[in-house]
Amino acid sequence: MEEDRSESDWGGLAPDILMNIISRLTVQELWTGPMFVRKSWLTVCRDSYLWSIFDLEPWFESYPQSAHLWSPDFERKVDLMLRSVVDWSDGGLTEIRVRHCSDYALSYATDRCPNLQVLAIRSSPNVTDASMTKIAFRCRSLKEIDISYCHEISHDTLVMIGRNCPNLRILKRNLMDWSDSSRRSGFVPTEYVDACPQDGDTEADAIGKHMIYLERLEIQFSRLSVKGLASICEGCPKLEYLDLSGCVHLSSRDIANNVSRIKRLKEVKKPDVYVPRSGDVAQTERYGHWRLYDERFDIQAMSSLV
């Protein structure tokens, strides 16, 4: 009788078989399906074995841009999910990929998951240097961090992360395309767009001085000048990939002269235009000659054409 009751509770499936099936589901499938079948299934879904990685990025990529994503109500929901996963992981969470979270949830995760290796929190307007400083001191095993479109995070965070996380290999610090407001009109709050960091050279200096082991760096639409680029190229000799898309204050000559110092560099993505900082009149230089220059960094692509 006890055996019949047990089988009924698990829906006719042995617990180990059920765990095997559930472990193959995406976070979205897990969160909207088996958790609501029966209590015993919910228990399995909360097993720490399933929660070493919390990745909502596929859902965000498939969801259309909406003002709702930038609302306090949506942020609270993301925070609640992240806190729940932290509890279920029993401290074993090593990878977090979310958007629109806050200091509240991030600090909670930091206190309980010291072995975090990947942190991607792009488009999180209420994540600040306060929680990022905690991460720098408590999560020293970080290998990858994405703080793109997080305007309340400053160069101070880059300094602290660089000083305390020697295993960091990937940094993504992309900013919004400030030259084309139509791409975000209607869903990103105007006041948030206006708060976009302007200190590109300060951030570049922090990267060059404190993140010397970086292998991949993305700083799309940064307002750094040739001075900032020089700091990065001098301080990060292990770079293999550098994304400068939208960095319009860098000329083709600036980029060519500086990246030539990085012997391991395999690929560099360049801005489409050049807008000099000096003077009030912006002159645009099209990079029609970049094809020849890119060949130096994309040997495999060249080989495939032969």
Image (spheres, helix red, strand yellow):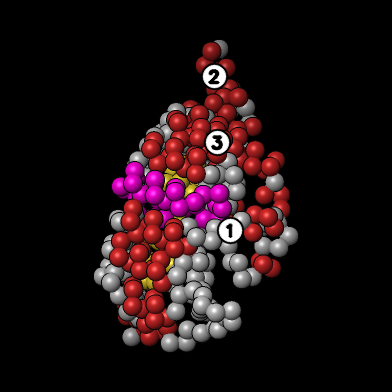
For disc 2, the marked residue is 6
Magenta-drawn stretch contains 151: yes
The answer to whether one can see residue 160 in this image is yes
Q: Which residue is mark 1?
A: 196
Tag 1: residue type?
A: Cys
At label 1, counting other C-alpha atoms closer than 10 Å, the crowd grade (few under 14, some 14-19, many 20 or more) is some
Identity of the residue furthest to the left in this view: 263
Give how far across and how far down residue 251 sits, in percent: 44, 79
- Kind of residue at disc 3: Ala
Of the two numbered discs 3 and 2 on the same chain, state the one appearing first in sequence: 2
**95 and 263: which one is in front?**
263
Range drawn in magenta: 143-171
Closer to the N terminus: mark 1 or mark 2?
2
Pick the residue in front: 70 or 274: 274
Residue identifier under label 3: 105
- Distance from Cα at disc 1 to Cα at disc 2: 57 Å
Q: Is residue 88 above or below residue 297?
A: above
Camera-near label (1 vs 2) is 1
Labelled disc at residue 173? none
The three-letter code of the residue at mark 2 reads Ser
Q: Residue 277: give x, y in percent of width and height.
A: 51, 75
Residue 10 visible = no
Q: Residue at x 64, y 42 (%)?
A: 75
Label 3 crowding class (10 Å Cα cut-off): few <14, some 14-19, many 20+? many
Q: CA distance from mark 1 to mark 3?
A: 23 Å
- Residue at point 30%, 65% (across, down): 234
Residue at point 44%, 58% (across, down): 203
Q: Is residue 81 left or right of residue 261?
A: right
